[in-house]
Image (cartoon, helix red, strand yellow):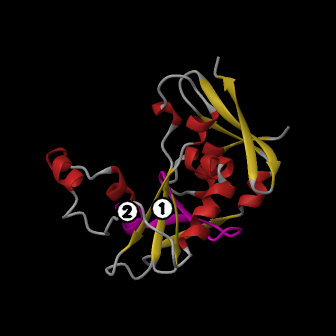
Amino acid sequence: MRKTSTEQFIEKIGVEVYPITIVKFLLNKRRILNYFENASQEDFRIPVKYTVGHSDCEICEQKKAEGILCRQHTSIDRVLNANTVLFDIDTSTYFVKNEIFRMVGNRLVIIYCPHPKLITGDITDKKARKINPITIEDANLDGLPQYEKIMEFMSLALMDQSMTCWFNYEFTLLTLPDSRDKSDWCLVPNR
């Protein structure tokens, strides 16, 4: 089995994408592409409406004293203000930090990838694969910005490999290739 360090893969490319973001994309590829497909439908209903600006966001207002935005507006801000992003040629999908994103018509779909070190309780498949999608439809959003630098890769090449990624202090996560759009995973002890 050929193992590839996701940390080294990203380091070689030179972008600010967290390794867990790439791994979660590989673990949830079919599901993420379905989110993009669903958002393209005219009758798609956005469960919680977010705007590009955060001035009318109650949670952002509460966090103002801490100098931070709410989780969703942090993701929006990262996507719209990034200088360098990673682009998957195979799926036309962008990556920056913890975010996987794409414009779908006039909607911006962002998939936030929480790090598994935040898992409490038992480690389950659902918790390890956890992703949080948000969809923004705002008249003030007319597309993605012109990024200074777009680094490209091909996710299909990664789907054929076992990618490793720091999971927590005890374990490293290892993807197990299954098909072109599906990976399983296991944990390998760090000691």
Residue 182 or residue 86, whichever sits in front: 182
The one nearer the camera, 169 or 63, is 63
Which secondary structure lies at badge 2?
helix
Boundaries of the magenta span: 77-99
Q: Which label sits on residue 125?
A: none
Q: Residue at x 14, y 46 (%)?
A: 65
In the rendered structure, are the residues bearing label 1 and label 2 in contact, judged by CB atoms less than 8 Å apart? yes
Residue 98 located within the stretch drawn in magenta: yes
Q: Position of residue 63 (x, y in %)?
A: 20, 47
Query: Percent x, y for residue 84?
Result: 48, 65
Quarter occupied by residue 56: bottom left
Taking the image as shown, residue 56 lies to the left or right of residue 12, namely: left
Q: Is residue 44 left or right of residue 191?
A: left
Task: Identify the residue under disc 1.
Answer: 110
Callout 2, which amino acid? Ile
Specify whether residue 50 is in view.
yes
Left/right placement of residue 52 relative to residue 166 reads: left
Among the 4 quarters of the image, the one containing residue 92:
bottom right
Is residue 9 toward the left or the right of residue 114 in the image?
Answer: right
Say which label, 1 or 2, has the lower sequence index.
Answer: 2
Secondary structure at numbered mark 1: strand
Extreme residue in the left direction: 65
Q: CA distance from mark 1 to mark 2?
A: 8 Å
Within 10 angstroms of label 2, few (less than 14), some, or many (20 or more) residues?
many
Circle 1: residue type = Ile
According to the image, label 2 marks what residue?
Answer: 76
